Amino acid sequence: MKLDFDWDQWNIQKNEIKHGISRLEAESVFYDPKHSIFEDIIHSDNKERRWIVYGVSLNKKILMCAFTIRNKKVRVINCRPASRKEKETYEKTKDRRNN
């Protein structure tokens, strides 16, 4: 299934400079067949729900991407290498997803 993405130019630059993650690498996480998505309750509000996806990128790194859905498109807010705890969450949930 092809997803449509909507990027803010600043977020592309921020992810590349701060985390070394390109737009294409961030998008690839959504195509990991074992990715896991959770609602980001802390950053969601009544105007916009936020989500977290954990998955393996095209460069074989486990990433954490925060995103929202706007106008039926995925809008990535931030994407970075997953922390140790986030990697553990991915490993625990990957076999329960998309079977």
Image (cartoon, grey):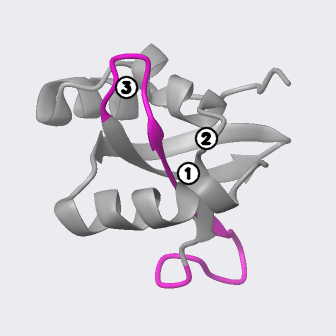
How much space separates mark 1 and mark 2, taking CA atoms?
5 Å
Q: Is residue 42 left or right of residue 83?
A: right
The residue that label 1 is drawn on is 67
At x 33%, y 17%, the residue is 59
To which quarter of the image does residue 44 belong?
bottom right
Q: How crowded is mark 2: few (under 14 residues within 10 Å), some or many (20 or more)?
A: many
Let me know if residue 11 is in the magenta part: no
Amino acid type assigned to the residue bearing label 1 in the image = Phe
Q: Position of residue 94 (x, y in %)?
A: 56, 54
Q: State the SS at label 1.
A: strand
Amino acid type assigned to the residue bearing label 2 in the image = Arg
Q: Residues within 10 Å of mark 3 (few under 14, many from 20)?
A: some
The residue that label 2 is drawn on is 75
Disc 1 to disc 2: CB gap under 8 Å: yes
Q: State the SS at label 3.
A: helix
User: What main secondary structure does the magenta stretch of the protein show?
Assistant: loop
The residue that label 3 is drawn on is 12
The mark nearer the N terminus, 3 or 2, is 3
Quadrant location of the N terminus in the rendered image: top right
Q: State the SS at label 2.
A: strand
74 to 46, vertically: above or below:
above
Q: Position of residue 82 (x, y in %)?
A: 27, 51
At x 35%, y 31%, the residue is 10
Q: Residues within 10 Å of mark 1 (few under 14, many from 20)?
A: some
At x 42%, y 27%, the residue is 57
Let me know if residue 48 is in the magenta part: yes
Query: What range is drawn magenta here?
Result: 41-61
Residue 52 visible to the viewer: no
At x 14%, y 35%, the residue is 18
The mark nearer the N terminus, 1 or 2, is 1
